[in-house]
Image (cartoon, helix red, strand yellow):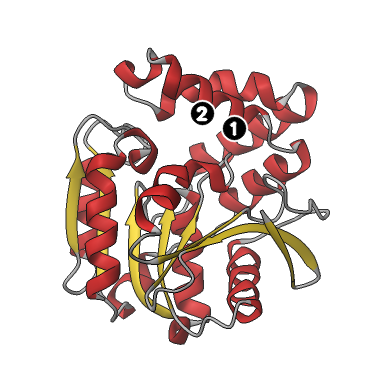
């Protein structure tokens, strides 16, 4: 792991395949860190440069006081690209990482070579969703990241992957290791995020939408609707995957991300 100061915050990151001209910046989901992209770091860096940061409040990065916002996360990542002298990158974001990718496009479109949106949506939280975020904040503050991980895991993985200790245990350990302050601030940022639906028709770069066939949080129908709102976007549905498609089925996701990055 390396560290950079981005907007006054220490961000931890991995940067592999630096000799390659094409760069892929991968933005992890919630409540995870860069390790959810381990299969992509290992499998893609022979062909493209892969930059995988821990967002503020996650993993080995600093946990500044909240509140956080999608705009702030996006600005952090652009500051990291500045630190690394990367003018443009293919931006890939999963779930909350997709929300950040939308913000990055709105604020810094010149830095975006192409967009890969994985298991995410453009809609803001509903009133019911906002209330669920508030309950989750209270639960984490009163309990622990580990207890929250136990609650979240069944919603993220397919039943088969949930029953596979090689996958379940890795996912749970990653979630349980996240700083409580970062989890709470991220929940607030997701609760308060803007509606990205008006952003969709403004996206003029190549866009790939990827979704797990068994994703129950952002199901394939949502992915189809998301892609329909973006000019010339295409959808790929990943079998044997839920909400964490690049972690659950990297054999199918890696070739898609490799080809998309190299061709964009």
Residue at image coords 69%, 36%:
178
- What is the C-alpha distance between the residues marked 1 and 2? 5 Å
Would you say 155 lies left or right of 227 here?
right
Would you say 177 lies left or right of 98 here?
right
Tell me if mark 2 has few (under 14), some (14-19) or many (20+) residues whose alpha carbon lies within 10 angstroms of its own: many
Q: x, y (%) of residue 167?
A: 43, 24
In the image, residue 25 above or below residue 43: below
In the image, residue 130 above or below residue 209: above
| Secondary structure of the residue carrying numbered label 1 | helix
Quarter that holds the C terminus: bottom left
Q: x, y (%) of residue 116?
A: 33, 62
| Circle on res. 103 | none
Tell me if mark 1 has few (under 14), some (14-19) or many (20+) residues whose alpha carbon lies within 10 angstroms of its own: many
Q: How many marks?
A: 2
Q: x, y (%) of residue 113?
A: 36, 79
Would you say 56 lies left or right of 191 here?
right
189 or 215, which lies in front?
215
Toward which corner of the image does residue 212 lie, by quadrant? top left
Residue at image coords 50%, 37%:
128
Residue at image coords 41%, 78%:
112
Q: Are marks 1 and 2 in contact (CB under 8 Å)?
A: yes
Q: x, y (%) of residue 92?
A: 40, 61
| Secondary structure of the residue carrying numbered label 2 | helix
Residue carrying label 1: 174
Toward which corner of the image does residue 122 lie, by quadrant? bottom left
Would you say 175 lies left or right of 228 here?
right
228 or 111, which lies in front?
111
Toward which corner of the image does residue 173 lie, by quadrant? top right
Residue carrying label 2: 171
């Amino acid at each position: 792991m390396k560290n950079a100061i981005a907007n006054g915050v220490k961000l931890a990151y991995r940067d592999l395949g630096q000799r390659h001209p094409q760069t892929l910046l991968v933005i992890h989901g919630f409540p995870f860190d860069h390790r959810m992209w381990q299969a992509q770091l290992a499998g893609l860096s022979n062909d493209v440069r892969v930059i995988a940061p821990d967002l503020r409040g996650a993993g080995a990065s600093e946990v500044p006081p909240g509140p956080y916002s999608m705009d702030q996360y996006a600005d952090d990542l652009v500051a990291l690209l500045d630190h690394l002298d990367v003018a443009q990158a293919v931006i890939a974001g999963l779930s909350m990482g997709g929300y950040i990718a939308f913000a990055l496009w709105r604020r810094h479109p010149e830095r975006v070579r192409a967009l890969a949106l994985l298991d995410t949506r453009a809609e803001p939280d509903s009133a019911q969703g906002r209330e669920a975020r508030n309950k989750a904040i209270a639960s984490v503050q009163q309990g622990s990241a580990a207890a929250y991980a136990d609650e979240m895991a069944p919603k993220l993985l397919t039943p088969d992957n949930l029953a596979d200790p090689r996958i379940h245990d890795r996912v749970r350990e990653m979630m349980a290791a996240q700083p409580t302050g970062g989890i709470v601030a991220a929940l607030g940022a997701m609760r308060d995020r803007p509606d990205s639906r008006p952003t969709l028709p403004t996206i003029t770069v190549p866009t790939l939408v990827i979704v797990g066939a068994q994703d129950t949080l952002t199901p394939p129908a949502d992915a189809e609707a998301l892609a329909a709102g973006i000019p010339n976007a295409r959808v790929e549905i990943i079998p044997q995957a839920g909400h964490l498609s690049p972690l659950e089925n990297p054999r199918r996701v890696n070739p898609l991300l490799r080809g998309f990055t190299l061709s964009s």
